[in-house]
Amino acid sequence: MRRKTRAGLSRKEFLRLGGASLAGAALLGAAGCGEEAGTGEGPVRLVFSHGPEPSGVLREQLDAFNRRHEGEIRVEWREMAADTGQYFNQLRTEFQAGASEIDVISGDVIWPAQFAANGWIEELSGRFPESERSRFLNAPVEANTWEGGVYGVPWFTDAGMLYYRKDLLQKSGFPEAPKTWGELKEMALETKREQGVEYGFVFQGAEYEGGVVDGLEYIWTHGGGVLDERSEKVVVDSPEAAAGLATERSMIEDGVAPISVVNYKEQETHQTFIRGASVFARNWPYMYGLIADPEQSNVDPAQVGVAPLPHAPGERSFSGLGGWNLFINAASQKKDAAWTLIEYLAAPEQQKQRALEGGYLPTLRELYEDREILDKVPVVRLGKGAILSARPRPVSPYYSDMSLRMAEQFNAALKGNVSPRRAVEILQRELENILERAG
């Protein structure tokens, strides 16, 4: 969702605070680009689209790629809007006009189904077989899968995490993080009262995409869902989904979270937590970098723990999946060269460099056992459980329309304007109408 940490702290600055560096990073020997390169007519020109990246690591890697493939392939970075909605709209406009020069696309984790359904991105199963996909985390691969085809390669990932003040919990007699939502409420209320903390728990409750992810996490951790993954039928009108939204609303009703959380986005969440005003917070991995910055945070990183999100009794923990993928424009005439670039960017060496120098969470399983990453990027080690329990948002070509309806009803239920039971009833009808209109 965000490629830069809040309050202006870039991921490179975040890692610098932890002393992370990478000297002499090795580069992957990517496969050749077949008939598109080495013809004597000059290098293949590739256009790669991505938003601004303050860390500088992407520029380093693209320059290294060009040196490695000098005379064969030359990639040019077309910098897109930092706002992912604007980026999406620009791509959609170009694709609909059939006039995009982009060959390799970086894209949000919620885009693949819509792009694939419209024929805008290449199906990659032949180039990216199961033997290779199995090296990646499950959820990012699932997010790139639509109607049995795989349309993207996971590049870097994000996951919702529970941050907590372990020093304050210990003072109140709680030696570890809560496992259930009920335990979180008990710990939050008792600790904020005994330790004089303003709030027990803060999270993203505003009417926007981040609020959708938080609402989905409450639903999933109560055993509910929105779309049946096999039939693609809407299943949100269930006791489990209603119970999830009821738990979210109870955070306000029971005094665990402030009423203002109905307007909280990531910025309000991290500002509250890093000034020491909350016992718990749900946020993305970027927040750990802010905690580590003494110029911005009143909280010592040694006082903070990171854990998977709680769940209802008898259910599992799930985190909302974020992150970005790499796609090939279906209209590109340079698909072999495009795949060479994707192989390079997604390779272990490049993912490790991005983690160490830029703070980007890798998508390859093996890197979650890499000692250097675990030592120098603490949030990977601390938040590993949350990362491995990440779950993609509903995979649908109509997700953007569905998300607007979910944002509205989740926020209305959180405010108490509608009951959780009524919210899921309304959503069931609205989401079914979206799918019916789409045919």
Image: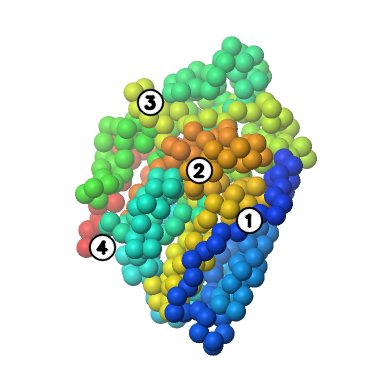
Instruction: Name the residue tied to disc 4.
Output: 438
Contact between labelled residues 1 and 4, with CB atoms less than 8 Å apart: no
User: Where, by quadrant of the figure, is residue 332 drawn?
Assistant: bottom left
- Residue 26's disc is 1
Relative horizontal placement of residue 252, taking residue 164 as reference (left or right): left
Instruction: Name the residue tied to disc 2.
Output: 366
Residue 214, position as x, y percentages in the image:
46, 40
Contact between labelled residues 2 and 1, with CB atoms less than 8 Å apart: no
Quick one: label 1, few (<14), some, or many (20+) residues within 10 Å?
A: few
Quick one: label 3, few (<14), some, or many (20+) residues within 10 Å?
A: many
Relative horizontal placement of residue 423, taking residue 182 as reference (left or right): left
Q: Residue at x 37, y 52 (%)?
A: 131
Mark 3 secondary-structure assignment: loop
In space, the residues marked 1 and 3 are separated at their CA atoms by: 45 Å
Q: Is residue 422 above or below residue 185?
A: below
Residue 372, position as x, y percentages in the image:
64, 40
In space, the residues marked 3 and 2 are separated at their CA atoms by: 31 Å
In space, the residues marked 4 and 3 are separated at their CA atoms by: 35 Å
Lower sequence index among marks 3 and 2: 3
Residue 187, position as x, y percentages in the image:
53, 18
Identify residue type, mark 1.
Ala
Foreground of the two, 195 or 363 = 363
Mark 1 secondary-structure assignment: loop
In space, the residues marked 4 and 1 are separated at their CA atoms by: 47 Å
Q: Residue at x 65, y 23 (%)?
A: 197
Lower sequence index among marks 4 and 2: 2
Determine if residue 339 is in view: yes
Lower sequence index among marks 1 and 2: 1
In space, the residues marked 1 and 2 are separated at their CA atoms by: 16 Å
Mark 2 secondary-structure assignment: helix
